[in-house]
Amino acid sequence: MKTDPAYELMRQFVSPVVAITSAWEGRRNGMISDSVVRASISPNVPRLSVYIHKWHLSHDYIWNSGRLAIHLLHREQLPLVHTLGFRSGRDADKLAGVAHRPGVGGVPVLEDCVAAFELRVINTMDAGYATHFLGHIEATHRGRDAEVLTAAWFREHLPAAWQSEWQDNYRRAQDVIEQHSTIEDRRWTGPAR
């Protein structure tokens, strides 16, 4: 992992570790992110935003469907983080064996989480290597009452057997980001037909 003093300071902007699920043309996927932000303070305008790297399969599913679900995870879900976050959905059905049900918008909703939010994409912003998706919350699901998994807690409790794999994935992602940081003039025009 590449770091410097400024990067370490940026790590203070914390977001919970979440699972993101998506679906497109009968296929489904799940991934892990720590870049979700509340995008409204009004209960009448419930919105969240998230950055999804363009090389993730979930990016394509969200871009094409205009739908996603964001799940707050709890500290007992490190195995789920490994299942959804350490490999690509292009290689395997990462949700096979993960208890879930179809949500009202058609995306998978995980059975075990602190809370789940089903979103409809209402706008996007290009970040070069990623797309910033702004989503309107269309349904919520309350789950287990437990402490939310944070990035700092995850790094502190990352099993030793996963350290090398996590470092390699992180370093590769940093390299791709540096190579693809140019902003594109790309406009999201709604779900694919």
Image (cartoon, rainbow, N blue to C red):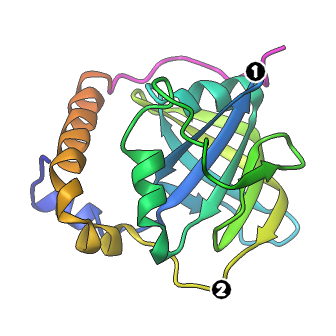
Picture mark count = 2
Q: Quadrant of the C terminus?
A: top right
Q: Nearer the viewer, mark 1 or mark 2?
A: 2
Residue 154 screen position, x and y as percent: 33, 69
- Label 2 sits on a secondary structure element that is loop
Identify the residue under disc 2: 145
Q: Is residue 179 visible?
A: yes
- Label 1 sits on a secondary structure element that is loop
Figure quadrant of residue 155: bottom left
Residue 44 screen position, x and y as percent: 88, 67
Identify the residue under disc 1: 189
Residue 1 screen position, x and y as percent: 14, 48
Majority secondary structure of the magenta segment?
loop
Q: Specify start and end residues of the magenta stretch as a single range.
A: 181-193
Q: Going from the N terminus, do you reach mark 1 or mark 2 first? A: 2
Q: Name the amino acid, label 2.
A: Asp
Q: Is residue 193 above or below residue 57?
A: above
Residue 104 screen position, x and y as percent: 90, 49
Q: Name the amino acid, label 1.
A: Thr
